[in-house]
Image (cartoon, helix red, strand yellow):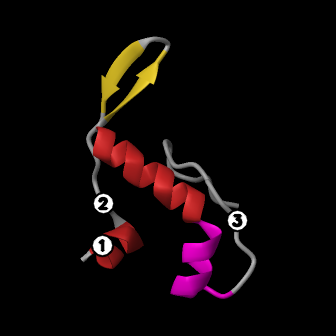
Amino acid sequence: MSRPPVGNHTIAIIKGKEEYQTLKASLANVIRDVNSTIKEGHVVVDGQKVNLEFFLGGDYKLSYM
């Protein structure tokens, strides 16, 4: 069994076909939260504002085009 790269975390496991509609419906809350976080550009951790920088990679890079 291989070890995942440091910093990568599983956020969902979906049973079904890897199709746009299945992913869109299954990940609606995740997509909403990610888009909101990107729009805000920061998160607050222990009362401290932490600015964020986003990089697209892998499949997400292609689907965003």
- The quarter holding residue 28 reads bottom right
- SS class of the residue under badge 2? loop
Question: In the image, 11: left or right of 6?
Answer: right
Residue 46 placed where, x, y %?
A: 50, 13
Could you say which disc has been placed on residue 56 in the image?
A: 2
Q: Which residue is mark 1?
A: 64
Q: Earlier in the sequence, mark 1 or mark 2?
A: 2
Q: Earlier in the sequence, mark 3 or mark 1?
A: 3
Q: Please tell me which residue lies in front, 1 or 16.
A: 16
Q: Which residues are magenta?
A: 17-27
- SS class of the residue under badge 1? helix
- The quarter holding residue 44 reads top left
* Residue neighbourhood size for the residue with mark 1, other residues' Cα within 10 Å, grouped as few (<14), some (14–19), many (≥20): few
Question: In the image, 31: left or right of 36?
Answer: right
Q: Which residue is mark 3?
A: 13
In which quadrant will I find the N terminus? bottom right
* Residue neighbourhood size for the residue with mark 2, other residues' Cα within 10 Å, grouped as few (<14), some (14–19), many (≥20): few
Tell me which residue sits at (24%, 77%) in the image. 65
